[in-house]
Image (cartoon, grey):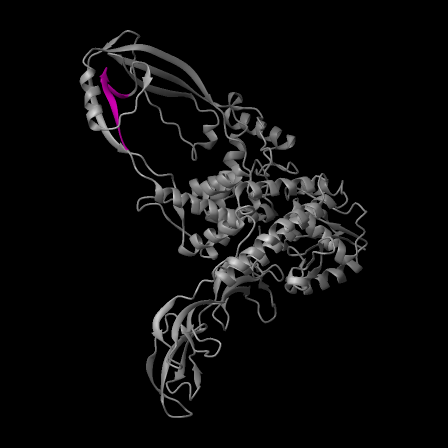
Amino acid sequence: MKKLVIVESPSKSRTIEKYLGNDYKVVSSKGHIRDLATSGKGGLGIDIENNFTPTYVISKDKKETVKELKETAKKCSEIYLASDPDREGEAIAWHLAEVLEVDKDQKNRVIFNEITKNAVIEAFKSPRTIDMDLVKSQETRRMLDRIIGFKLSGLLQNKIKSKSAGRVQSVALNLIVEREKEIQAFKSEEYWTIDALVTKNNKKFKASLNKVHGKKIKIKNEEEAKAIENACNGDYVITKIDKKVKKKQPRLPFITSTLQQEASTKLNFSSKKTMSIAQKLYEGISIKGNHEGLITYMRSDSTRLSDVFVKEAFDYIEKEYGKKYVGKVHQKNNKNAQDAHEAIRVTHIDYTPDSIKEDLTNDEYKLYKLIYARSIAYLMAPSQSDSVSVTIENEGHEFNASGSVLTFDGYLKAYKDYEQNKDEVLPEMSEQEVLKNVSLERKQHFTEPPLRYSEARLIKEMEEKGIGRPSTYASIIDTIQKRLYVELVKSNENSKTKVFIPTEQGFLTDAKLQEYFSSIINVSYTANMEKDLDEIAEGRKESYTELKEFYDKFVPLLDEAYEKMEKLAPQKTGELCPECGSELVYRNGKYGRFISCSNFPACKYTKSENEEETQSEETCPNCGSPMVMKKGRYGSFLACSNYPKCKTIKKINAPKEEPKPTGEMCPECGKPLIERKSRYGTTFVGCSGFPKCHYIKKQPKKKKGEENE
């Protein structure tokens, strides 16, 4: 009998089975198989009164998967649980053990940080038991998010028609709203600068006024600027020259947040796109016929690198660039880092980006090249520059100029595409030298408001403040956009950078949350909650204690909000209902905004927000009245103009669209996956081998009122 290995992803299962050989059968759970039920009091799936006991059910879309796993497990001698090496992965392993009745006291949990043959084989030499502290931490987080997601989202939907709220989502929205308020309240102030423009030995450079009679200077208006210019009527004398050799250390290897930031600024990738591509690189790409993982696990907040990789990298750097380019390890983990696995790095030092370019898509190549460059650059020697600082004085007015020349490129040799050094060369000068060719230039400026958050800036802020986990940033940013709380727009016409601007609904949602829930929807409370979850994972805190403390604080706030929060009246359209004469209003439904009668439910008249009636040449087959074309949630249709007396409708058959190839292969039969449209107009990805193969790529679903964090 074979040994069964269960992983999360179908694409990983094929690769790992090939590494382990004929004694193993590797299958996929396709992520979580169970979730909290939506039954019981409040639909939480949590028995609050019985020590917050959760009730789990098999997810609807995983029932067939679980059935197959059970049947396969019966035919195998041993079962190994090899889900991802993080809290979610540990929870998935525990749920599998529960459903498949695997002995949780046995060492059947296998983790690996990279999907390479050596890493996988080594991992199977030392399996461990399921870490129940990690499971409890994930379970606590899930229950917190369910309580907040269901109860708080229900309140907002009822009172102000906002779609959701969440433990981390709402704090991220608050950061964006508060920044926008700062910008709106900002009052620009005038200030002036004065520069000395110097020409010496046919070289021009600029020295900026910094001090007057030893004190820092701030010039408020043109009159002050002119007065300073008039006072500089003596010689311009070089009073000090400082020469130094400056070293610049390479940046630490990527963690999830820094990868998202760098991909945003250097590649213009959204965080969601970055994580999607990184997932593919981790799970494996077919390289010259061999399916291999190209990077280590992409959800990491540790900057640690394995000793094996460090040695390989040092040998590569010496061979490729020379011994003087070999650097050293200078690790500096974040205080909140979970050091369970490594930083994000490449798995094969010999797989240079250009050598495997033909096997990657353009976006995969760009991200892999960035990760490869950072993996190598971190272990290279620092760059060196000859730096010169010059102080020039005129009647107590002190001007400063600086220049530098790169003398050794060091790590920039590998990272030059993403970080560049610009030489600023100053002419040769000596102390007490009098400069002859000098003119003054005054300029008017105005202070600028703080920058709006780009994706990179928001991720950096959340990480620095300890809000959420780097692995969830992409989903949080995606959620607040889908909820229509923020818009991502270009900062200006000439910039590629997009920034977040709150919508009217975003402002309203944040205002109500801060009015009633400011004690829990804030940076410090959310960051402390993350620390509590970490301590549960380390076995130093109890799940029940943290849940009860939160719940006892949250429920009174919720009760007060239900009692006092004013209900938002629907926006009027200015039209009257053609059926009962009441006013028509805008409402939000499952398929977007629509128009309905304010007298609902007594009057059920509705129409699309952009509905236009166009008379057709057809007549109603039932009453003979003209048919009109209307737009509904599933597209255009013909309806009788004698509605509501005659309710005849007729479907309009749209021209059939040809399926579009996706570039992916079916994990079940190997045929190409294609993009299709369902009869309801929704797009889905399925196997081109239909009807022989019924594989449909499932999109992740979120229950009403829930979020990932």
Q: Is residue 459 left or right of residue 37?
A: left
| The image quarter in which residue 330 lies | top right
Q: In percent of the image, x 73 and y 60: which residue is there?
A: 69
Between 161 and 92, the one nearer to me in the picture: 161
Residue 539 appearing in the image: yes
Q: Magenta segment, principal secondary structure?
A: strand
| The image quarter in which residue 219 lies | top left
Q: In percent of the image, x 49 and y 50: which residue is there?
A: 515
Q: Position of residue 186 (x, y in %)?
A: 34, 40
Q: Is residue 281 left or right of residue 596?
A: right
- Specify the segment rendered in magenta: 190-208
- On whether residue 176 falls in the magenta region, the answer is no
**How many numbered marks does the figure carry?**
0
Q: Image height check: is 569 above or below 197?
A: below
Quadrant including the N terminus: bottom right
Between 377 and 312, the one nearer to me in the picture: 377
Q: Position of residue 425 (x, y in %)?
A: 32, 20
Q: Image height check: is 512 above or below 228?
A: below
Tell which residue pokes out farthest to the bottom in this image: 623
- On whether residue 203 falls in the magenta region, the answer is yes
Q: Position of residue 705 (x, y in %)?
A: 56, 59
Q: Is residue 435 left or right of residue 487?
A: left
Q: Image height check: is 13 above or below 529?
A: below
Between 42 and 104, the one nearer to me in the picture: 42
